[in-house]
């Protein structure tokens, strides 16, 4: 019997691979789906048009925009985007493997966060034909031991020690026929709702919110003097039980600047390249602080 382990996001790969190396019964390939489906458009994502719309969303977050218009009537060149295998291609390859090898099984690993749960819904809506061979390991509100031996409740797989995965594997269970139907319906609801962001309320319950959901908090954390954008983002995510990705919040800061709700200094590239403040008086840069490796946008 072959085994494929599925995770959502590269941060989960190293710890799971280390755990697999500890137990030959877990031996198998680790397949990582890259897209964070908890943010951005999902409408008709099961079509080429929907996937194209989602790709445009990520280009927008990355700051990719058309080049300045050339002189004369020459057409504006399209932005150059580095092509990489997309999740749709990875999924097609997975289905081909499952068809070719009837003994192959899949374990979907999901932490208690919106990215993993949305990824699970996306997958399960398309895997009904392989019922009985697709398993879920949902680490929902479960206690684990950290490096000091203390109990904690992780929200993401990368927070878990590799040896602790050996206990978690006992939770693997086949997805039921009822779940294929109900969770497949939930995925279609999420696509039709097409919210700007999706938050995990507990269990597997996902709630959609508008794109500007965090704007008020970003403004609250901005003051009358300039402060590094990454610091504002860090202060917002530090208050959240389920942090949203830095890249999304950095994009929202840029949108608030464009709308005139914030002023900026520096290049609007990564959140380490510019500072923000509320419009009006002030304007002094905040003193530099010694912090550990702020995340790039």
Image (cartoon, rainbow, N blue to C red):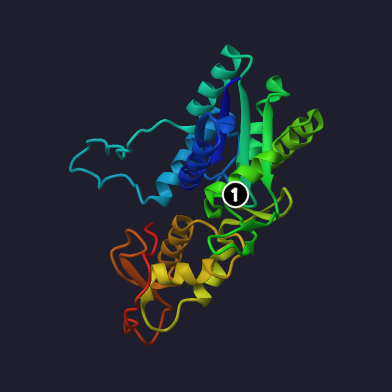
Percent of width and height locating residue 293: 36, 64
Q: Residue furthest toward the left?
A: 71
Return the residue nearer the eye: 256 or 231: 231
Q: Is residue 43 above or below residue 197?
A: above
Return the residue nearer the eye: 96 or 72: 96
Give me the residue at 38% from left, 33% from top.
Answer: 84
Percent of width and height locating residue 87: 50, 32
Percent of width and height locating residue 68: 25, 48
Return the residue nearer the eye: 247 or 143: 143
Q: Is residue 11 above or below residue 243?
A: above
Q: Residue furthest toward the top?
A: 100
Q: Which residue is mark 1?
A: 164
Q: Secondary structure at mark 1?
A: helix
- Quarter holding the C terminus is bottom left
Q: Residue furthest toward the bottom?
A: 281
Q: Is residue 273 above or below residue 245?
A: below
Dividing the picture into quarters, in which one does residue 103 lie? top right
Q: Is residue 38 in view? A: no
Dividing the picture into quarters, in which one does residue 184 lie? top right
The total of numbered circles placed on residues is 1
Give me the residue at 48% from left, 34% from top.
Answer: 52
Percent of width and height locating residue 217: 55, 71
Local packing at callout 1 (Cα closer than 10 Å; few below 14, some 14-19, many 20+) is some
Return the residue nearer the eye: 290 or 52: 290
Q: Is residue 128 in view? A: yes
Give me the residue at 56% from left, 52% from top.
Answer: 160
- Quarter holding the N terminus is top right
Going by the image, does 214 lie left or right of 184? left
């Amino acid at each position: 019997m072959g085994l494929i382990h599925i995770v959502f996001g590269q941060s989960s790969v190293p710890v799971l691979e280390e755990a697999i190396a500890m137990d030959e019964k877990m031996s198998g390939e680790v397949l990582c789906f890259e897209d964070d489906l908890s943010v951005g458009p999902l409408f008709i994502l099961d079509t080429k048009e929907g996937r194209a719309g989602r790709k445009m969303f990520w280009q927008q977050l990355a700051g990719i925009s058309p080049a300045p218009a050339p002189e004369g009537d020459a057409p504006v060149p399209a932005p150059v985007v580095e092509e990489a295998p997309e999740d749709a291609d990875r999924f097609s390859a997975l289905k081909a493997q499952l068809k070719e090898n009837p003994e192959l099984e899949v374990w979907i690993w999901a932490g208690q966060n919106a990215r993993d749960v949305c990824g699970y819904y996306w997958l399960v809506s398309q895997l009904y034909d392989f019922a009985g061979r697709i398993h879920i390991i949902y680490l929902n509100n479960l206690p684990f031991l950290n490096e000091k031996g203390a109990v904690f409740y992780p929200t993401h797989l990368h927070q878990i020690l590799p040896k602790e995965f050996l206990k978690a594997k006992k939770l693997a269970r086949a997805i039921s026929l009822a779940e294929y139907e109900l969770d497949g319906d939930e995925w279609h609801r999420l696509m039709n709702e097409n919210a700007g962001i999706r938050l995990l309320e507990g269990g597997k319950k996902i709630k959609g919110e508008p794109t500007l959901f965090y704007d008020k908090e970003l403004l609250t954390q901005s003051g009358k003097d300039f402060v590094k954008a990454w610091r504002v983002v860090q202060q917002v995510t530090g208050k959240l039980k389920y942090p949203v990705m830095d890249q999304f919040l950095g994009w929202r800061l840029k949108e608030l600047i464009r709308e005139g709700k914030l002023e900026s200094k520096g290049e609007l590239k990564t959140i380490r390249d510019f500072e923000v403040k509320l419009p009006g008086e002030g304007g002094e840069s905040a003193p530099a602080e010694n912090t550990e490796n702020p995340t790039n946008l």
